[in-house]
């Protein structure tokens, strides 16, 4: 019986040594086996996407440390040997022994599935990644991984191969700073490519910097010839600057970006918007730093409140004729907006799991937009007037098009 179990594991997870194990070892091996057997279940796929997804997964942990207020700088580095590292100046992953497992907390976090964050009571993970699988999955899918923790004056280090501890936690030096550095080399027996794309990673790191204002994210590549490529992302204006970036090659209708943020019932919402002179709508939505391309409750809450507030302002200020009525589509012509919410327990639905399902979020976002967009309009009447005028023009154009269509059809009959 025991023999069967052993051979099962070696078959399923090649490269994992079989030895005598205790309870937590079995748990680790079973976790590793599951991840290495069906990696796509955990990271989406084993192609370029999945490879890059692993970087996001590790970066998310540092983003969480930053969102908890303990870290201001994150560095992502493509090393000359093909490995990648993510370091931060946070508190450092705890190294004290887990009372039940009798292992350092950092080892638990990096080797046990779904262990991430569990030892940090009182704060919830905000980012969590699209799949939210944690660093232990990335570890399982890496030829090797090393972690360096700087805490309480000491530098700690440990090493893993394909998710298995090969060098236990040791002190390798002293320091005066704090932080965590995770370095790994993806397993080429798992991934179809182990080469990172500068552009793909840079785009996501820039996006994360926009979504999390004030965090400094440095992206570096050390080339074989010693040359260094580096880009720094830091946006103190957050999604306000994101909207400016999206509008940079367009003519904007008003110079100032409309911006507001509020936390209500544990959900925080941040909204930035600016109209341009085109007719296209470009509303990007995020939930916990994930681009919800299928939309969801935050988007519907935003849309309904936007329609209501713009119509109400137009009527109250006599900018709308009795016969005029602006539809949501009219009001979103030429709109560039970013809607970013942070939700304690996000439910992702839809074909690609990029649709926010939490029903409570719709009412929260719509009430925030109702209140704060109305306030913004009262305080910035020149902007409000331009928004209403643009919507009225769109409504009239729509009405004229409908009439022309009807007329053409009647003539044809
Ligand atoms: C839980 C508790 C503490 C730190 C972290 C998690 C932490 C995790 C990661 C992952 C990447 N970088 C990180 N930085 C910190 C600290 C608890 C304490 O010091 O009191």
Image (cartoon, rainbow, N blue to C red):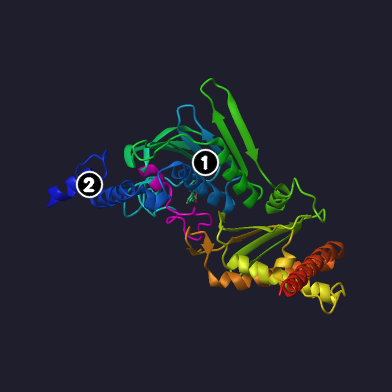
**In the foreground, 206 or 24:** 206
The residue under the point 87% across, 62% down is 382
Residue 177 percent location from the top left of the image:
55, 38
Query: Dot 2: within a 10 Å radius of its alpha carbon, few (fewer than 14), some, or many (20 or more) residues?
Result: many
Q: Is residue 176 above or below residue 306?
A: above
* The magenta segment: 117-140
Mark 1 within 8 Å of ligand 1, using the beta carbon = yes
245 left or right, relative to 49: right
The residue under the point 49% across, 30% down is 79
Res 13 → quadrant? top left
**Is residue 258 in view from this perspective?**
yes
- What number is the disc on residue 245? none
Q: Is residue 399 above or below residue 172?
A: below
Q: How many marks?
A: 2
- Residue located beneath label 2 in the image: 9
Residue 159 percent location from the top left of the image:
37, 36
**In the foreground, 212 or 41:** 41
1 or 2: tag closer to the N-terminus: 2
Q: Residue furthest top?
A: 225
112 left or right, relative to 92: left
On whether residue 129 falls in the magenta region, the answer is: yes
- What number is the disc on residue 179? 1
**In the foreground, 30 or 181:** 30
Residues at marks 1 and 2, CA–CA distance in whole angstroms: 35 Å
Q: Is residue 378 above or below residue 249?
A: below
Determine whether the residue tagged by mark 2 lies in a helix, strand or loop.
helix
Residue 314 percent location from the top left of the image:
82, 72
**Is residue 96 in view from this perspective?**
no
Magenta stretch: helix, strand or loop mostly: loop
């Amino acid at each position: 019986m025991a023999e069967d179990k052993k051979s099962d594991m070696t078959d399923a997870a090649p490269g994992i040594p079989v030895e005598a194990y205790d309870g937590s070892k079995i748990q680790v091996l079973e976790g590793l086996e599951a991840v290495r057997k069906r990696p796509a279940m955990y990271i989406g796929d084993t192609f370029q996407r999945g490879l890059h997804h692993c970087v996001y997964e590790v970066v998310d942990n540092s983003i969480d440390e930053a969102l908890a207020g303990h870290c201001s700088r994150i560095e992502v580095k493509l090393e000359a040997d093909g490995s990648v590292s993510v370091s931060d100046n946070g508190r450092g992953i705890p190294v004290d022994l887990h009372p039940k497992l009798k292992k350092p907390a950092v080892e638990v976090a990096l080797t046990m599935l779904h262990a991430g964050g569990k030892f940090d009571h009182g704060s919830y993970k905000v980012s969590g990644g699209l799949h939210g699988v944690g660093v232990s999955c990335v570890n399982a899918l890496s030829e090797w991984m090393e972690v360096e923790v700087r805490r309480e004056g000491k530098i700690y280090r440990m090493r893993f191969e394909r998710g298995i501890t090969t060098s236990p936690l040791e002190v390798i030096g002293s320091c005066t700073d704090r932080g965590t550095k995770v370095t790994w080399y993806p397993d080429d027996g798992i991934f179809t490519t182990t080469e990172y794309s500068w552009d793909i990673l840079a785009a996501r790191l820039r996006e994360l910097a926009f979504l999390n204002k004030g965090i400094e994210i440095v992206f570096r590549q050390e080339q074989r010839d010693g040359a260094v490529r580096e880009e720094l992302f830091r946006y103190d204006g957050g999604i306000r600057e994101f909207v400016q970036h999206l509008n940079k090659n367009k003519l904007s209708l008003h110079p100032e970006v409309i911006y507001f943020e509020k936390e209500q019932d544990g959900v925080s919402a941040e909204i930035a918007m600016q109209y341009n002179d085109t007719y296209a709508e470009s509303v990007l939505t995020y939930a916990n730093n994930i681009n919800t391309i299928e939309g969801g409750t935050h988007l519907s809450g935003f849309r309904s409140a936007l329609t209501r507030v713009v119509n109400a302002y137009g009527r109250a200020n006599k900018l709308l004729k009795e016969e005029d009525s602006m539809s949501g589509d009219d009001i979103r012509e030429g709109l560039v907006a970013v809607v970013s919410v942070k939700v304690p327990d996000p439910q992702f639905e839809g074909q690609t799991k990029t649709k926010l399902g939490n029903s409570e979020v719709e009412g929260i976002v719509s009430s925030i937009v109702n209140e704060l967009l109305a306030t913004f309009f009262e305080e910035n009447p020149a902007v409000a007037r331009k928004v209403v005028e643009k919507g009225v023009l769109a409504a009239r154009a729509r009405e004229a098009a409908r009439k022309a269509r009807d007329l053409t059809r009647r003539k044809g009959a």
